[in-house]
Amino acid sequence: MMLNRLGKKGTVGLEMNDTHLKAVELAKKGGQAQLVNYGSQPLPGGIIQDGVVVNKEALGSALSEFWQKQGFQGRDVVIGISNQEILVRFASLPKVEQTKLDSMVKFQAQELLPLDISAVVFDYSVIGEKEVDENPMWEILLVAGKSGMIYDFIDALEIAKLNIKEIEVLPLSLMRMLSAEDQGQVVTVVDISGGVNNLLVLNEGTPRLARMMPTFESTREDTSQDPVEDEAGTGDGADQVAASREVTLEEPSAEAVDNRELGFIVNNIRMSIDFYQSQNQENPVEGIRISGSGARNDELKGMLSAELMVPVESVEPLSTMEVEESIRMASEKEFALCISLAYRGLEVD
């Protein structure tokens, strides 16, 4: 990882889904990204639904309580958003100068996005280049989200007196989960958590398909959940010794899901990979990596491997991103997205 590019200040990666608030605090100490705090807190129903804020005042209050209870020191936050009001598109445009590319992307966005451009916030990145009929082209990743949805998250964090450093679309956060070996392959990374499941297909580290998929629970009329207790790890530096304990997040439980839910998850992943491979037959998916609560479910991993005939493994985000544990984190897979978001915050300092 490019540790020399990390900023000095700490940052918090925050994930807000239908059932939980989750956060990880990282700092750069001695040239090393270091875990200093993490935690989770159940989120009452009716605040976020399918990844969209329903009650921003209640969310702001819940965030204030969460920060105080878990003892996060930093208030600079990178948040991840994932819902059906966000679109990710891939496009090829003529290779022109950056000043002209901005205008070209804005014009093409009206063609690529089935939304009123005046009602969305959008951004783009150049992810590569290629030739089409001997013409040089930029490969573009375009992301757009409805303005009202995004500002509901912003307003909630302002209520909690938190400073947003960056907003990232959660499927794209999965890019940082790749091991050195995965960087040379075609790999699908999937995060299975509460509210929306996120999927990203990467070819040698470059994103090629991003999907935000509903969970099985979100398709059922009864989405009520049993109350759960808070569990977290805390710490304020390398010199602090924290008790080691497993953090079990009572999201739609990976171990307790029935065959219908497993089938639903596997089918969504298979359809996404099938779509990718229909467009990229020369570069088939060589492996699947799982994060979130689904990473604990060996039955799910076995079903995916049998269905798609590729190896399926859990991610190891702390080692992949070279994060030192000043406190022990026994549940890094469930906090993988938060780790990635916090790491992004160090990169942009």
Image (cartoon, helix red, strand yellow):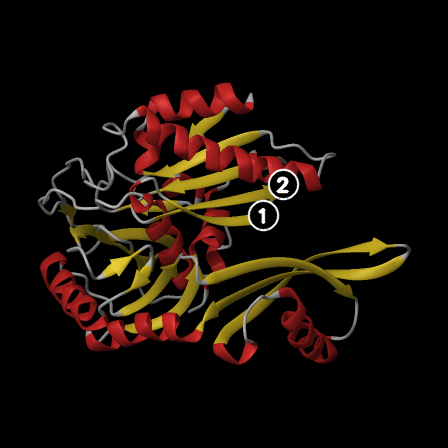
Residue at the farthest right position: 134
Residue at the farthest front position: 221
Q: Which of the 4 image quarters holds residue 275?
A: top right
Q: Is any part of residue 177 visible from this angle?
A: yes
Helix, strand or loop at label 2? It is helix
User: What's the amino acid at mark 2?
Assistant: Tyr
Instruction: Return the residue nearer the eye: 204 or 224.
Output: 224
Instruction: Return the residue nearer the eye: 20 or 28.
Output: 20
Helix, strand or loop at label 1? It is strand
Rendering coords of residue 181 (x, y %): 56, 33
Establish if 237 lies above or below 286: below
Disc 1 to disc 2, C-alpha distance: 7 Å
Rendering coords of residue 189 (x, y %): 48, 40
Residue at the disc numbered 2: 276
Quadrant for the C terminus in the image: bottom left
Q: Which residue is drawn at 15% across and 47% down?
A: 232
Using a 10 Å C-alpha cutoff, classify the residue at mark 2 as few (fewer than 14 neighbours), some (14 to 19) or many (20 or more). some
Establish if 44 lies above or below 97: above
Mark positioned earlier in the residue sequence (1 or 2): 1
Q: Is any part of residue 11 visible from this angle?
A: no
Rendering coords of residue 84 (x, y %): 43, 57
Residue at the disc numbered 1: 209
Q: Identify the mark at residue 221; answer none if there is no mark.
A: none
Q: Residue at x 60, y 29 (%)?
A: 286
Instruction: Return the residue nearer the eye: 251 or 240.
Output: 251
Are dots 1 and 2 in contact, CB under 8 Å? yes
Q: Which of the 4 image quarters holds residue 264?
A: top left
Establish if 162 lies above or below 246: below
Using a 10 Å C-alpha cutoff, classify the residue at mark 1 as few (fewer than 14 neighbours), some (14 to 19) or many (20 or more). many
Left or right: where 247 falls relative to 35: left
Q: Which of the 4 image quarters holds residue 242?
A: top left
